[in-house]
Amino acid sequence: MHLDFLTEEKEKKIIAFLKNQKPVISVTKTIGYCDFEFRAIVKDIHEFYTLMEDLRKQFPDMIKDYESILYYKFHQNLNYFPFD
């Protein structure tokens, strides 16, 4: 995601929002091209777009743009460490 007007407080709010979304399995703060990346396991494209719509509604002044990479099948066990 490319974000505008990012402050430390808003950053924490976005991370908290994403952590509370059932499909989201990881959030990464990046350096360079994008500000944040997140991974989500969704059942279909509609669920992904609903998640992005909810994110844009929650943070309308911040999300400038986003890009997505969709994997239709993913056959690997994931083991991400929790934030806390």
Image (cartoon, grey):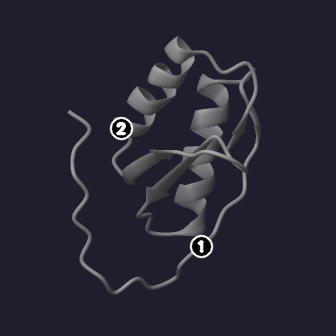
Would you say 61 lies left or right of 47 here? right
- Residue extending farthest to the front is 31
Would you say 68 lies left or right of 27 here? right
Task: Tell me the quadrant of the picture where the C terminus can be found.
Answer: top left
Would you say 16 lies left or right of 78 here? right
Q: CA distance from mark 1 to mark 2?
A: 20 Å
Three-letter amino acid code at the position of disc 2: Lys
Q: Residues within 10 Å of mark 2 (few under 14, many from 20)?
A: some
Task: Tell me the quadrant of the picture where the N terminus can be found.
Answer: top right
Position of residue 12 measured from the top left corner of the image (x, y, whole percent): 45, 22
Residue 49 vertical position relative to residue 62 in the rendered view, above or below: below
Q: Which residue is mark 1?
A: 70
Location of residue 76 by image quarter: bottom left
| Residue 7: numbered disc | none
Marks 1 and 2 in Cβ contact (< 8 Å): no
Q: Residues within 10 Å of mark 1 (few under 14, many from 20)?
A: few
State the residue at coordinates (67%, 33%): 56
Would you say 55 lies left or right of 26 here? right
State the residue at coordinates (58%, 36%): 54
Three-letter amino acid code at the position of disc 1: Leu
Residue 61 vertical position relative to residue 76 in the rendered view, above or below: above
Position of residue 68 measured from the top left corner of the image (x, y, whole percent): 66, 62
State the residue at coordinates (47%, 47%): 28
Q: Which residue is mark 2?
A: 19
Along the polypeptide, which appears first: circle 1 or circle 2?
Answer: 2
Position of residue 4 measured from the top left corner of the image (x, y, whole percent): 76, 26
